Amino acid sequence: MLMKFFVVTIDGPAGAGKSTVARHVAEALKICYLDTGAMYRSVGILAVSQKKDPVDVARTMDFKIIYSEDGEKRIMVNGRDMTALIRTPEADKEVSKVAAIKEVRRHLIKKQRSFAQGQSLVLEGRDTGSVVFPEASYKFYLDASVEERARRRYEQLAQKTTPPTLDEIQKDIIRRDNADKKRPWGALTIPENAVVIDTTNLSLEEVVAEILSHIEE
């Protein structure tokens, strides 16, 4: 039997399938889902577009996740729909920059932890199981080959815009991997006691089932 309130963290590099998997796990468990990457992307986009200090943006940002009647997730920041803007190549370039700023991380981690007050939560990112919720009840780390992650990102972008080439996306993923692993705060790492899942040759349904098998034991 699951405890009254619990936290599930899902970490991993870009393109490993974290967001989609986390959303489906949360739906299966009927609990809240938090996309932490959307928070950092929002800070990056707003800081550039409004020419503001990313720390000030993170400190004052009102971040909400809402769902339409058909179940589509919308990212609302300061009352503005940022759903499309945070999934652009421009957002990809800014996210690692702002995520490396210690004070930005401090403000956003505080906001992330507030989502778990009085409710169970599934969240995903780079350091959710190592820094944000090191005592989480269930921790997972998703990975996949660089080639597969680039292919997934290409298909995701192609649904909304004209994407960069696969080679360009792959190079950007490698760049982000290096930046995420080397940053001094909240670096991408496998959290202690996390279950590691290589999603390269697994379907979405298989990954979700594997995670649920550990949670529902």
Image (cartoon, rainbow, N blue to C red):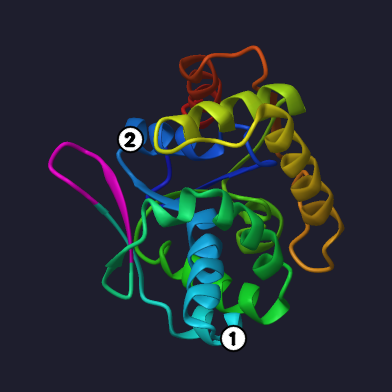
Residue, disc 1: 53
Q: Tell me: residue 215, above or below residue 3.
A: above
Q: Can residue 154 be seen in the rendering of this structure?
A: yes
Quick one: which residue is furthest to the left in this view?
A: 69
Residue appearing at x 35%, y 35% in the figure: 29
Secondary element under disc 2, as helix, strand or loop, is: helix
| Relative side of 217 to 14, left or right | left
Residue 199 falls inside the magenta stretch: no
Q: Would residue 146 appear left or right of 89 to someone viewing this image?
A: right
Can I make out residue 1 in this image? no
- The residue closer to the viewer here, 88 or 148, is 88
Near-viewer residue (111 or 89): 89
The residue shown at (48%, 65%) is: 42
Q: Quadrant of residue 198?
A: top right
Q: Quadrant of residue 51?
A: bottom right
In this orientation, which residue lies closer to the viewer: 165 or 129?
A: 165
Note whether 77 is above or below 148 in the view shown: below
Horizontal arrangement in the rendering, residue 80 relative to residue 202 (left or right): left
Residue 95 percent location from the top left of the image: 62, 60
Q: Amino acid at mark 1?
A: Asp
Tell which of 118 and 40 is nearer to you. Answer: 40
Comes first in the chain, label 1 or label 2 = 2
List x then y, in percent, for residue 39. 49, 63
Q: Residue 27 got which mark?
A: 2
Which residues fall within the magenta stretch?
67-76
Q: Are marks 1 and 2 in contact (CB under 8 Å)?
A: no
| Residue 184 on image: x %, y % | 84, 68
Name the residue at 68% across, 22% down.
148
